[in-house]
Amino acid sequence: MDAGAAPFNPDGWGPPDNSNPLPNHPTNVPFAPFSRSDKLGRIADWTRTYNNPSRNKNPSDAVFDFTGDDSFGGGAGIAADEDPSFRLVDGKPPPRPKFGPKWRFQQQRQLPQRRDEEVEARKREAEKERARRDRMYNNNRGSNMPRREAAAFKSSVDIQPEWNMLDQIPFSTFSKLSFSIPEPEDLLLCGGLEFYDRTYDRVTPKNERRLERFKNRNFFKVTTTDDPVIRRLANEDKATVFATDSILSTLMCAPRSVYSWDIVIQRVGNKLFFDKRDGSQLDLLSVHETSQEPLPEAKDDINSAHSLSVEAAYINQNFSQQVLIRDGNKVTFEEPNPFANEGEEVASVAYRYRRWKLDDEMYLVARCEVQSVVEVNKQRSFLTLNALNEFDPKYSGVDWRQKLETQRGAVLATELKNNANKLAKWTAQALLASADLMKLGYVSRVHPRDHFNHVILAVVGYKPREFAAQINLNTSNMWGIIKSIVDLCMKLNEGKYVLVKDPSKPQVRIYEVPADAFENDYMEEPLPEDEQVQPPTEDASGGEASAVATDVEQEATAEA
């Protein structure tokens, strides 16, 4: 194949001006590579310079731009943008819209810019929302908290002028205490237990169970000195200090408490008795005690602190009986229920009278309770049964019906924040009774404004020691608090004293009170009728309120 001869040009690039055209080559066509969108001119010349250095240069077009060259058709001094004879012909099809008809008339290069603007707008909105939440949180802490303290933080007992304050102990000293105590021994077991119904472990918000009422079963909240078994053990000199699990747990978890409470202390000879008053707050269950959200101030409001405490105590009693197999099969112990009359139907409960060694010469005896028993691999395990109650998701911020199945940990974390003291006391009671398992029920109102009807949404079991570690409850610290209070009280003279949690400060005070204080003939000035809280009443549609009133009456009768 003959490639042909190429003429030599000594003066520059390209063929010489006077050379003959190449064979089979059209005339007046440059030798530069180009596409349809490129401007046509002579062959590229990298040796030339621009006459106007300030002119915008596009590097990709520089070697093909001959607008400043006299040999280009437009003539010298005519810029490409001003060439009237130039027409750009582009055969490419127009770009198809990517986002539907609404983008048909938008230029493609504007789309990324629009997306960036939307992202920035979302960021600005998120920042505004975060700032709004921070303002609301700070307002709640700054303005609402004092208002709530004024309403709810009221002394549990009226301090009389003749009472003599002996000492006050700040909670900060309790946190540093520690005392190791050996394992306790069982002195006596009384009562009877029914077996736990394991079908309740499979209850979910989608197959909830209605909370039943147990009006015919009697529940007893007997104080220490009214317990015939403790009186008998005291006469036999089995110990020096006597108490119940509810009183001990209140003292053990005192640093977590917010509401005021009081415990009566009696020093008789060389013995020490920890008691509760008739109608004491220890018989009720606090609700939202450690929450930052304020509760309604009016006592007759169904969501006030006192109304919720009565409702929670009612729920807890009925839940502890509903989750049992009520077929008459019971586990009985050495003695029957010491507070029940013959033939009386009583709740499933066993009392374990246990003794701990505080030092070489001092022992503590406490009455501890378990509510049920379960048999696994032919071994019986004791259970404690307690119920958390949801009254209105607005106050907690977590809707149990939505979160219990998917985010149970978040629900428990919220309850630990709002009810830290109550959960710690339940855990301490389970540890005192050496229960193998503690069952927590999640009970909610059928409707937020209906405090008579409830449903069980879930039941979860925990091992007490593992749960105590989870909520940061230190058993050595708990017993350190008990040991310090016992040592302090043993230095007092014989007589009656009362230990009161300060209603507004994290501290407890010890008062010396008359010997007839809190007895039937020592009556404080009663509140006016409009300030007294009556048990809730229900219309003809139900009988839950009467059940609460019956429980209160039965407790008062048992204590008397």
Image (cartoon, rainbow, N blue to C red):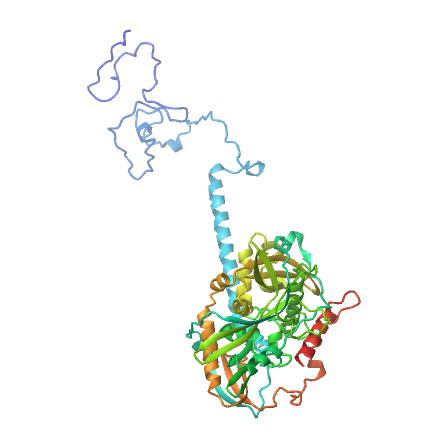
Give left or right: position of 559 versus 108: right
Residue 411, x across and y down, in percent: 56, 59
Above or below for 265 versus 395: below
Looking at this rendering, what residue extends furthest in the bottom direction?
A: 162
Point out the residue furthest to the right here.
Answer: 540
Name the foreground residue: 140 vs 522. 522
Give the residue displayed 45% in from the left and 79% down from the top. Answer: 484
At a point 60% along the width and 85% down the height, the residue shown is 158
Along the line of sight, the residue nearer the viewer: 267 or 148: 267
Q: Where the C terminus falls, by quadrant?
A: bottom right
Q: Is residue 404 left or right of residue 488?
A: right
- Point out residue 540 in the picture as x, y percentages from the top left corner: 80, 67
In which quadrant is the N terminus drawn? Answer: top left
Q: Residue at x 47, y 26 (%)?
A: 92
Residue positioned most to the left: 10
Question: Which quadrant of the view contains residue 520?
Answer: bottom right
User: Looking at the picture, how far across and down is residue 454, in whole percent?
Assistant: 68, 62
| Residue 256 at least partly seen | yes
Q: Is residue 451 above or below residue 83?
A: below
Q: From the viewer's perspective, is 143 left or right of 56?
A: right
Of residue 102 and residue 187, the one placed in the foreground of this image is 187
Q: Quadrant of residue 553?
A: bottom right
